Image: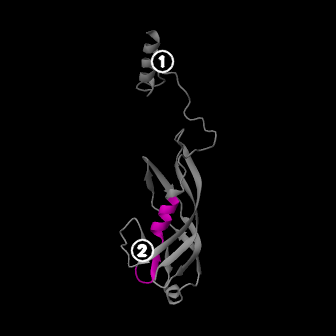
Amino acid sequence: MKLDVSEALAHPGQEYRFSGTQAIADQEITGDIVRIDDCAVEGEFMADEEGQIAVRGRLRTVAHAPCANCLQDASAEVENDFDEVFQRNGDMEDDEIFAYEGHEVLLDKLVMSYAVMALPIRFLCREDCPGFEYRDPDAIPAEPGTQYPFAGLRQLLDNNEEV
């Protein structure tokens, strides 16, 4: 999403409204792929006398990832407010600042940053998701080759109780 700030640069201190959508690439977060729908973005921007552009507003989207308990598909609504200053002719590659060149401010980096910051710590398919069904590690597997990841811990616990 691009903002044409030429009018704002000509009239410092004047606020201009904007709205639109911004696509965000899939993100790998703690080993899971999080898919984020296009973000709806709206807000205001204005220039100051030095050519810096203050941008503030709100973004809304939906993020999708595996449920932390059962690995089924899970979704979460994401909303976040932002208030940032874009520096004229700053280093566009610097992750610590937002910068712009010419008369266009690109909001892709800002929207991606604020959407990712607002993601839930854990995605759940439903609030009361019980997770995987408990299975007795001593039971005979239903299918040959089925492994139970906590069977070794169970064996250590059993050995400790015998002592």
* Residue visible at 45% across and 80% down in the picture: 104
Residue 151 percent location from the top left of the image? 44, 23
The residue most toward the bottom is 10
- The quadrant of the image that shows the C terminus is top left
Residue 120 percent location from the top left of the image? 55, 50
Residue 107 falls inside the magenta stretch: yes
Residue 152 percent location from the top left of the image? 41, 22
The residue most toward the top is 163
Q: Which residue is nearer to you in this view: 85 or 130? A: 85
* Residue visible at 49% across and 24% down in the picture: 142
In the rendered picture of this protein, how many numbered marks are placed on residues? 2
Left or right: residue 15 compared with residue 158: right
The amino acid type, in three-letter code, at marker 1 is Asp
Q: Which residue is mark 1?
A: 138
Left or right: residue 32 compared with residue 129: left
The answer to which image quadrant residue 17 occupies is bottom right
Q: Which residue is nearer to you in this view: 111 or 65? A: 111
* Residue visible at 47% across and 62% down in the picture: 113
The amino acid type, in three-letter code, at marker 2 is Ala
Range covered by the magenta-colored residues: 101-115
Is label 1 in a helix, a strand or a loop? loop
Q: Which residue is nearer to you in this view: 34 or 98? A: 98
Residue 80 falls inside the magenta stretch: no
Give the CA separation, mark 2 to mark 1: 60 Å
Which mark lies nearer to you, 2 or 1? 2
Q: Which residue is mark 2?
A: 99
The answer to which image quadrant residue 144 occupies is top left
Q: Residues within 10 Å of mark 2 (few under 14, many from 20)?
A: many
Is the residue 148 above or below the residue 155 in the image?
Answer: below
Please report whichever mark, 2 or 1, sits nearer to the chain's N-terminal start. Answer: 2
Residue 126's mark? Answer: none
